[in-house]
């Protein structure tokens, strides 16, 4: 396992779905940053189950505890340990299927890699629950980024083949947060909700696409050749279970454009150099341009479905069938939305530090 | 700059388009690996200009030199410095446009980040020419991977909206290497070549999609949570200039599938657990499944075009227009093909080492 | 802060002297390793206060909790979070001197670096208490190393100018563990204890020298040029508060030897190449020779003393005097002994993994 | 091999004693830094053989070449490749002893680790010649540090048991550079030279101690717990062949002091907090105090001696005797002096960057 991410601002995750807790160590937070548990709790609550029609019936209080690195309401400069205890655990759901590899999950690869010693209950370390740690770290990163005016958000742009209409980022900010699917297009969201309710009846699941946007990113972030802004964002976002692809700006559509269409012309605006379009998604040569940073990730349909699936019993090494009857989200997309914006914040925070934009002490 | 990539098998790149050379230091190569310059030269030749209709007229001999780490025809265990001298340099092409930011290039972001001190001639460090270093490193990685039977290849699957028909991997191996566009579908390749020839007349450019495939990847490679196989592949591939997105297996199409369609059922085959489909692209939970590893990257259309473009003169801080008349590829896709397979090899080699599959000495 | 150490076997520490807990995340432990809390508790108990005459009167139960990474008595392959709650905290001791920089402590440097936001109670993150995390991580590392026969130990060789007589390593193993000062020379230990009891009466403190030895280290560990075995050991050992120097084998005495005296002749012994002496301390060229690895660290005298000291009041920016009346060790050396062997184990474990000697799964 | 050192300012070394060249890639140099080859050449010349009585008769011109990263006399922000070609190579010296392990050298450990495939001629990668790369990197680091007033120097304080009298740092600056042994005490230097001349006649060699000092280091550099200033300095200095120990400030003498003697009292001086003594060597809690940074390293006596030594023939696996008749330094200490100050500069430069003290662009 390599459970640490980042260079100057690093996060180290731990915990399992059905163990005592999930948590994260955040290192590199500037001393003096005001940090209230409530700030972190608020982000975690967005990720929690029970939000909208897509959700599992597993309910966790997900109460954030701060075990180190904060004193008198401010970051001390020392590593910050943030922890959530697991409470609503139901081992019985998993006990009966423990030898059956769940298609689409990491059961098989974890079993091979860890010789069957991995804690497979609920996916263990590979559970989506681990992303609660990402969100807690992201909450700290967002507080840091706010000191230089950088803001990250994410919203649902597609579920089950239903695409949201493009709207202005201003509208996204206003509308996405309060929509049950974090979708800024209310009509599309309604359609998506119907599709999710419908797929539930079939005991099946849906995937979708999330767009992340970062505003006020100063030009110059990113450390090519290899620690590019897009490269590290992709790596961070692919650490979210169920993400199978990442694209920036025009992304895969760029394959069908001419150079003259895809190139973003440079213009002057208020004495500043900007581009009149943003097919680059705010990144050129691995470095931020100062335009909004735009990234999209695809979330595969939830692997856990109650439909009968073909699999293998690893103890008997025999073919078997499997119905997964635990509590699962029919569509994980809305719950992944705050995770996407959290990981964007983590990456941007690290690069802002590498660029010397965040002082070691915030007063 | 962060010009080093990898954990146990690392590559460190240097050089600029119009400087004395481009090169790479490869560290972590097992001692005893037979390594002839010809092995590396062969891979570099595939990347060289002049291959097919898409190419620039800049012609480099690209002769590989080995400056360290090889003795008596074998790797010594010490870092291997591989270098190619730059020869066919034409500064005049760039001198006249040196203050004009080329849309789609890193001119602007590099200028901001490096305060205008960057060597902007031909894009300097951001030139596609730097990928000659990737290919040299990839050649070493491929030799190492061959000792455990792992093979990587890449092929063109789309150019200018023209998609190649899916064919078996066996056919890809046979057909793609010798096709001028590295496309395994001869009819599509012909169409693509026509499209490229046609776009040249418009002084414009085309993009496309490259698929990389790795065979015989043992199950268990990848170090989640953060050093996932897909995450590191994405990061490595996004270090190739012009790549704007990366997807694995079904990729973005997974957004439109049901869980029951997208999940790959586990079956037994010859006593081994495999999946009957491969929507996962050979990766689950950030770890290889043992199925073919399938990744696709989008290559944006070449940014350098001779059409007039709107831009800004950074010295005068005034709007300006620009025609790029240097020697450029109308479509960079075929030349990027060997770079994609090289970077896949670099990443797989590192993970195979982390998994303890590559001995420190090869006898 | 950079609170993570290691490449394949990594430890990430957190916690403060007077916060809720101190802890460590151990990542990279092979799955399947049997791991009982008792194994870890045993090492922690050696470090605990109250052992011998040198100790503070602060008494912590130091009960080890395992929050992740262990399931059914074995490591799962996932990160292992180990935690000790702080219990016997007495803020009052520190409240009255909070603006007075304690000479020899990190109060001043932490105050400069973290702008006064650091939790200065008891030294916060800079307290020797943080080394409880090192010892817990070391306990895991020792269990791993035991699977390949490698053993680390440490013992006191000098306190307050009183040097222990050199004895065979066999005797060190038998005698040092149970001596109250972890010294293998009972007579010298008695003298040292008298010296400590005497210095206490003067409200002063003593330092000393600890020797660490590792047995059965296979030849070939270490990754020069920069990740040398000695370099990483030195770095790890200097992370122990109060360590001010590190030497290997003959160490600083080598400055006074001739080459012919200092060179260790190679001889054959039982068909194996060994050296007849060990001035190299088991390391040549940054790589283990297979001989016992011998390192010595100097521990400065405890900085906290009850004698009046000259200092500065940082609030008033005025000269001040200070008497530190909290509970402190008059000599920290014996408590640092298990920390030295723990950090040696952590470093050796990482290099053994890099050399491919530790499988990913232990069965 | 792990041939890269540093986090934001990194150096990557390559080359062998008897291969085509030795070199270094310096990454992270701020763009705009004026950088003339002459600046680097000057430092390299200090390290070169032929300086003083202690030296080998191997004479290299050691002409520095800049292959990348510098344009129009300034750093571009891209990695800087610096290279020195090897010229005066005499393979014959080594051919006749190639199967005989040289005591004190890395021949044996390299042979084990690299299976005999390492280039053993002249020690290959383990030769002191590799430190020419350290010195070139250090020259760049010194230029960067000079922009914030930080200065590093090193001088010989002991050779063959002859210790230099302590003098003020001001005198060290004036006297050490031009002394043939880089010793600030002319009388001691004379004695040392006699000792070296005398030991040559015995075909034997001498070691010594070098002290490194850094001035104007701002308080607050260092990233504990693990990336401490002392820890990284020790690691960097132990990468110099022949260094067997490192100590800071009072170092090993602290073991014989009382706390009341060893603690440095804080006082106010010109409105700034300083310490009245500097037993801490400018480092407390792994962080710089602002006082002069003082480190000492022990250099073992040159391993290559012409006296007959006992060894093993690795081909025949039989005892053998060996006389090393190549060209070698009877005392490597003076040539290691510029290497010590170079590595100090490399480490300080990296920490200054991590602390945000060095801008990305220097104008």
Image (cartoon, coloured by chain):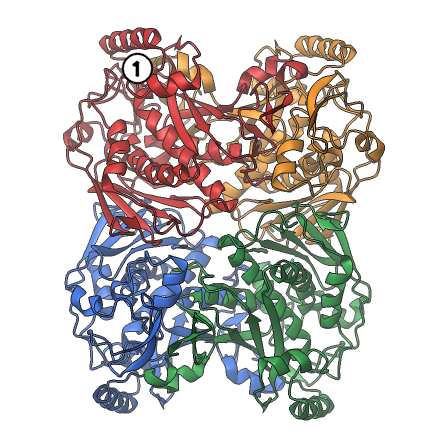
Chain colours: A red, B orange, C blue, D green
Residue at x 15%, y 36% (from the top left corner): A87
Quarter of image, res B176: top right
Residue at x 39%, y 37% (from the top left corner): A146
Q: Is residue D271 above or below residue D187?
A: above
Q: Position of residue C100 (x, y in %)?
A: 30, 71
Of residues C275 and B109, the one drawn nearer to the viewer in this rendering: B109
Q: Name the residue beneath numbered marker 1.
A: A205
Label 1: chain?
A: A
Residue at x 83%, y 39% (from the top left corner): B87
Q: Is residue C363 above or below residue D161?
A: above
A138 to the left or right of D122: left
| Quarter of the image that includes the N terminus of chain A | top left
Q: Position of residue A188 (x, y in %)?
A: 35, 8
Label 1 CA crowd tier, 10 Å (few <14, some 14–19, many 20+): many
Residue at x 36%, y 15% (from the top left corner): A184
Quarter of image, res C43: bottom left
Decide if residue B338 is in sight here.
yes
User: Does dot 1 land on a helix, a strand or a loop?
Assistant: loop
Of residues B282 and D272, the one drawn nearer to the viewer in this rendering: D272
Q: Position of residue A158 (x, y in %)?
A: 39, 14
Q: Position of residue A159 (x, y in %)?
A: 36, 13
């Amino acid at each position: 396992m390599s459970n640490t991410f980042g260079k100057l601002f690093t996060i180290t995750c731990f915990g399992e779905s059905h163990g005592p807790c999930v948590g994260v160590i955040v290192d590199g937070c500037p001393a003096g940053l005001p940090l209230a548990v409530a700030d972190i709790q608020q982000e975690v609550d967005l990720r929690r189950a029970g939000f909208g029609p897509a959700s599992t019936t597993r309910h966790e209080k997900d109460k954030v505890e701060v075990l180190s690195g904060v004193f008198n309401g401010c970051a001390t400069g020392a590593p910050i340990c943030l922890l959530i205890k697991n409470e609503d655990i139901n081992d019985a759901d998993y006990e009966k299927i423990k030898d059956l590899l769940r298609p689409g999950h990491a059961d098989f690869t974890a079993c091979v890699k860890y010789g069957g010693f991995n804690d497979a209950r609920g996916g263990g370390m590979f559970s989506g629950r681990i992303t609660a740690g990402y969100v807690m770290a992201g909450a700290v990163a967002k507080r840091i980024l706010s000191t230089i005016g950088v803001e990250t958000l994410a919203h649902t742009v597609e579920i089950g083949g239903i695409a949201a209409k493009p709207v202005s980022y201003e509208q996204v900010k206003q509308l996405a947060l309060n929509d049950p699917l974090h979708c800024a297009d209310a009509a599309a969201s309604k359609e998506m909700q119907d599709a999710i309710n419908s797929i539930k009846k079939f005991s099946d699941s849906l995937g979708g696409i999330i767009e992340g946007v970062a505003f006020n990113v100063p030009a110059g972030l990113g450390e090519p050749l290899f620690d590019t802004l897009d490269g590290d964002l992709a790596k961070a976002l692919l650490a979210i279970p169920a993400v199978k692809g990442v694209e920036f700006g025009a992304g895969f559509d760029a394959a069908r454009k001419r150079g003259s269409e895809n190139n973003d012309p440079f213009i002057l605006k208020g004495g500043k150099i900007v581009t009149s379009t943003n097919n680059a998604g705010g990144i050129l040569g691995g470095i931020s341009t100062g335009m909004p940073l735009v990234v999209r990730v695809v979330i595969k349909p939830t692997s856990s479905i109650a439909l009968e699936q073909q699999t293998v019993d690893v103890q008997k090494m025999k073919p078997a069938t499997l119905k997964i009857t635990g509590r699962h989200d029919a569509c994980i997309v809305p719950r992944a939305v705050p995770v996407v914006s959290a990981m964007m914040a983590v990456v941007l925070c690290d690069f802002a530090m590498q660029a010397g934009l965040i002082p070691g002490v915030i007063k």
